[in-house]
Image (cartoon, helix red, strand yellow):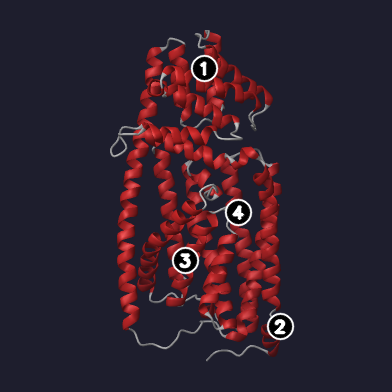
Amino acid sequence: MQTQPPETADTAARNGAALWVALALFLLIVLSNLLMLRPRLTDRVDTWSTKVMQADFTARMLYGSFLPFGSVRAEEWDNVLKILTSRDAPLGALVRAVVLIEDRSAALGEQVARQRIRQLLQRLPNAPTRFPAPQRESILRWCRAVYGEGRRPSEREVAEFRQTIEQANLGWFRLLALKQLEFRAGNVDEARRQDVEARAQADRLQGSLLVIFAVIALLILTGLALWVAYLAWKASLRRPALSPPLASPHADVVLWGLVAYFAATYAGGWIAGLIGRALPPSTNLLVALVLLTQVATGGVALWVLSRVMQKQGVRWQEVGMIWKPLTGHLVWGTGAYVAMVPALLLAVLLAQVLLPSLPSPAHPIAGVASAQNPAWVTVLLFLVAAVFAPLFEEIFFRGVLLNALWARTGSRWLGIMGSALVFSVLHPQLYLGWIAVFVIGVMLGLLFVERRSLLPCIWMHALNNTIALIAMQLLRSAG
């Protein structure tokens, strides 16, 4: 028999204090994120980071000879060059364009290639950049000597220019630049070695993409089949309308846990930022700091939620802590993930087609996950993305927020959409990246409503993040 909460819980439920405090904290976090985004919106270098990464990725993919990418049209290379040389392009993008034109000079025509390189060299000195002045001057000297003057550099210059190229953050274009430098210096064997490595990395990328595309195609077909089977199953059922697991008087009680989660997240992020600025630059330290912050903030919020629930007699089953049947929940979570893939890809494609000028960056942790890391850092990344993030986020966004909105309003759709919106906006994939997260949040909400348990949601969330980490590791291994 359910324990009846005291009169204070009824009063709190009526005035909705926790909901308003949670909303105020949510708006504070969003405002803080937008203020942090403001420099990126006005800084021409930062706004170009996604474009440069996409151009680097596309050029490397087109460079390979692995089917079905073996035949590349000239227009495809032109599209890459248009991205790299458009208005307000930073120094790094223009240097990549110079390197690519030099490499494609035979196809473009020597005279056309020389003219385009001269035009870009004139833009380099005034291009925006984050490089310090000495490094910027070193890059300009290298480009003028190798691509402008076309002379054979001295041994001292070759050594200097090698170091410049290695430090210029050119990504895969670094191999082409080294090849061209060694060829200009007369080191034909070394130039050939760099060319072989560039093509090997391109072929590995193409092979990895084929594997990923095949998996995605299989997931799309299976996901569509699951939707058809699910809709047919729902149509055959005759069951009453679902009610939320949470009793209506307890909605405001559990929302104080969400208040604690927002407050801890905001304070924890601020403190972690101060600590991060005091630490020496290190990816390993950054990952460890993120994990510690995540565990501390989520743990504090979970402790507060547990205390208010215990005080007001709210059971854990009411927020979705229902583990049986375990196998059934895991099967539903896996099926929901597969069914989400077609909807997720469709949303991403529509966003890019309708708003092509807006970049859709990945989660910041993606850059760390795609880098070369020690094994223990990879384990920490897995704990951050695939263990603690699904656990805490599903408890507070689905178990608390969706549940409470559903209980207070009687509308499960308001709970699903409201929790998905908050879930997506609080993720750092700004510009258009939040749309994909919103689709994931909607699917997680539908799954919670269907199963009335957090376990399939946690499992689906963990699957999504784990597969994303695996894909990034696969692409990283491809060079």
Dot 2 and dot 4 residues touching (CB under 8 Å): no
Residue 196 as seen in the image, left or right of residue 410: left
Viewer-proximal residue among 53 and 26: 53
Gap between marks 3 and 2 measured at Cα: 31 Å
Q: Pointer 4: what residue? A: 292
Label 2, secondary structure: give it: helix
Q: Pointer 1: what residue? A: 147
Viewer-proximal residue among 470 and 226: 226
Gap between marks 4 and 3 measured at Cα: 20 Å
Mark nearer the N terminus (4 vs 3): 4
Q: Pointer 3: what residue? A: 458
Which residue is found at the position 41% from the left and 62% from the top? Answer: 343
Label 3 neighbour load within 10 Å: few <14, some 14-19, many 20+: many
Between circles 3 and 2, the one closer to the viewer is 2
Which residue is found at the position 61% from the left and 79% from the top? Answer: 309
Q: In this view, does 146 lie above or below 4?
A: above
Label 2 neighbour load within 10 Å: few <14, some 14-19, many 20+: few
Residue type, label 4: Leu
Between circles 4 and 3, the one closer to the viewer is 3
Label 1 neighbour load within 10 Å: few <14, some 14-19, many 20+: many
Between circles 3 and 1, the one closer to the viewer is 1
Which corner quadrant holds the C terminus? top left
Between circles 1 and 4, the one closer to the viewer is 1
Gap between marks 1 and 2 measured at Cα: 71 Å
Between circles 2 and 4, the one closer to the viewer is 2
